[in-house]
Amino acid sequence: MDANGDTCKYLVARSIYSESDFQKKKDKRKSTQKSFRKRLKKKCSCTYKKTLLGAKSLFPVFDWLPKYKWKELFVFDLVSGISTGLVGTLQGLAFALLAAVPAGYGLYSSFFPVLTYFLLGTSRHISVGPFPVISLMVATVVLRIAPDENFIITNSTELNGTVMDTDARDAARVLVSGTLSFLIGIVQLILGALQFGFIVKYLADPLVRGFTTAAALQVVVSQIILMLNISVGNYAGVFSVLYKLGDICSNIGKTNFADLIAGILTLAICVVVKELNERYKNILRVPIPIEVIVAIIATGISYGGSLEENYNVAIVQTIPSHFIPPMSPDLSLFPEIIGSAITIGIIAYIVAVSLGKVYATKYNYVINGNQEFIAFGISNIFGGVFSCVCATTALSRTAVQESTGGKTQIAGLISAVTIMIAMLSLGSYLEPLQKSVLAGILIANLKGMFLQTLDIPRLWRQNKWDLAIWIFSFVASFLLDLDLGLPISLGFGLFTVLLRIQFPSCSALGNIPGTDLYKDPRKYKCAVESSGFKIVRFSSGIFYGNIDSLKNGISSLVGFDAVNVFNKRNKAERKLNKLMNRRHLKATKSEVGNDFTGEDEDDDIVSHMALKEGAVKHDAQTKEVRIHIDWNSELPVKVSVPKVNIHSIILDFGQITFLDVAAVEALKMILREYKRIDVNVYIAGCDDNVFETLENCGFFDNIIKPEIFFLTIHDAVLYIEDQVFGRSNQPDLKTD
């Protein structure tokens, strides 16, 4: 700041540079590319150092575990692991029911995938296991392939003559779930091997948040069914959630009030205590494990009061107290579930990586997106063999692991051991637990997802396009089901990008007096447009889809259409030449005037018309007189020729990042169209890669030369003023 409170100033004195002059004088390097053979040789070469780095990249545990400070960090990881394991035990049971498989398989899903992620994962803080949204998507596939109707058998002892073979149904659903996890793992592993970690960039944050909010609402609908303990149809596909809501309304009179009261009390207590945990997290060393406390109390009440026998409540029933043997996936299901496997695999990856990046930023380390694909791919393949539900990470469980002091994946390993101990030694004691209690616990853990609805007013203020993506993703995913909602939402998101590229802003620029800065006069009062030329900024790459937008934008800003002007001038010139040759007009050196007063329709408008110097020419062979006219003067013919009040146009290419072949040809045509009506077009601020594209596409010829390209807008302005007026009126930039 100077003494007057203004920012510091600087004065630049340099030559006016066209692009070609600058490249010659400043020795631009020629881009060279190694041959494919050399690049392949370098990629495939093997050294000890490269092998070691590759091993550490594939197995990150070999990198961080030798550096682990056992005395300083192990106590934190131990406390965190036990706390997370206790929470994960209850969540595993709830998420398994959500996935339409027996509750015990949720415990397997919280154990086996953790073992492989410990070796392969790059995030230190996420807690690997089932997640409500993913479990619901798995349930959609499971119920579609193994619905209840397929397992109804005839039984004469029953009143209605039929009975559900629940053992066969559960076995079939476990097989479908395990096979789906196995295929999801294969998809994730392939995407990781092919370095497809960048795919997450195409799923915009508003899209993912709208999708997960819709999924959370679908989870609530499914859990309301458990809390009411009523029967609904097994719907899947488009509008399935509406059919479920219809069945809930139809059967609400059959509500089991013992289950409803237990579910509501659980939900209320968990929400309140979780809010207290969040509010007093700086005081509480370890968050209150309310899920565990509620589950223990509810199990005791259910067992002591014999609620199943007395009130017909739905309970967990069987929790395995041992590990099941590995299973072989059903390969015949692959063609039927491959589409769902791709969708679920990508969403599971996005959830895990997005959460992992939050904690990586907070604790200043980096996670590798491609390695995360590989880690979760192998984890789901391994988990699928042991009948696990697809693994990702749960927001609440990860928050517990981080808030209780977890530093590394050793906390995750300890949480898996805790779940294993709970399953082997305490699982049978949780069998009387009501399913409605688990439903209340699950809904309470969705609070963070429902808070995403606060995005709507924020996005309304910040970006309407992102708001449209959020709302479309939410509505499509909720109504059309999650499997179909995601790709449709992705397509809509890409469509909005295409629209923004196809219809970008096109604005005129004016100079900020006394500077080399150029801004939109509609936004800056002090910006002044120069007379005689227009500066046009196009804020997008140019491709075949927005060529017309560029043409129309230029025409709108300069006030005329070059093709229309050319056609009108040709028509007027033909009429004038016709009148001259008929001697209805006479031409002097400086003007054309009427020399005939008759009844011809073309000789009764104006008496004189200005000519450009030396514009009258006589054809010696045909004896015809041809003229070159000042088109801004009045014409003695009935042709309305648009006035052209500029002699030059400067196209600001500073925001143009790419051109395709169609755009190059269109740009070439634009320059020719304005050139033939005596308007020169210059281009400023062109990126080197864009300039090379123009060269490679044969943009330059005898008419369009590289000299029309300038480094900056101000270079072009000074050049034009020097050419037209023989001077430069900007003292801050001096010419050589």
Image: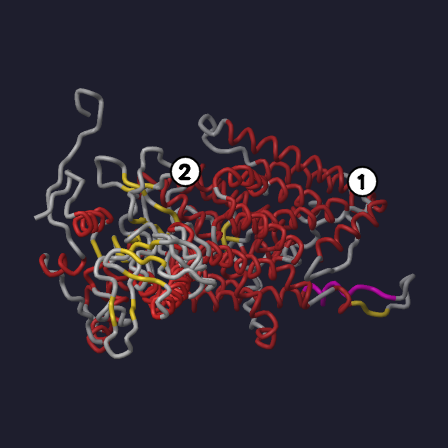
Residue shown at 36% from the left, 46% from the top: 508
Residue shown at 19% from the left, 75% from the top: 38
Left/right placement of residue 203 relative to residue 259 reads left
Viewer-side residue, 594 vs 105: 594
Quarter of the image where one finds residue 336: bottom right
Answer whether residue 367 is visible to the viewer in this image: no
Residue shown at 51% from the left, 31% from the top: 278
Image vertical order of residue 668 relative to residue 511, above or below = below
The residues colored magenta run 162-170
Give yes or no for contact between labels 2 and 1 (Cβ–Cβ under 8 Å): no
Quadrant showing the N terminus: top left
Three-letter amino acid code at disc 1?
Answer: Phe
Q: Which numbered marker is on residue 257?
A: 1
Quarter of the image where one finds residue 710: bottom left
Three-letter amino acid code at disc 2?
Answer: Gly
Measuring from the top left, give residue 73's x and y in whole percent: 34, 40
Measuring from the top left, give residue 711's x and y in whole percent: 20, 53
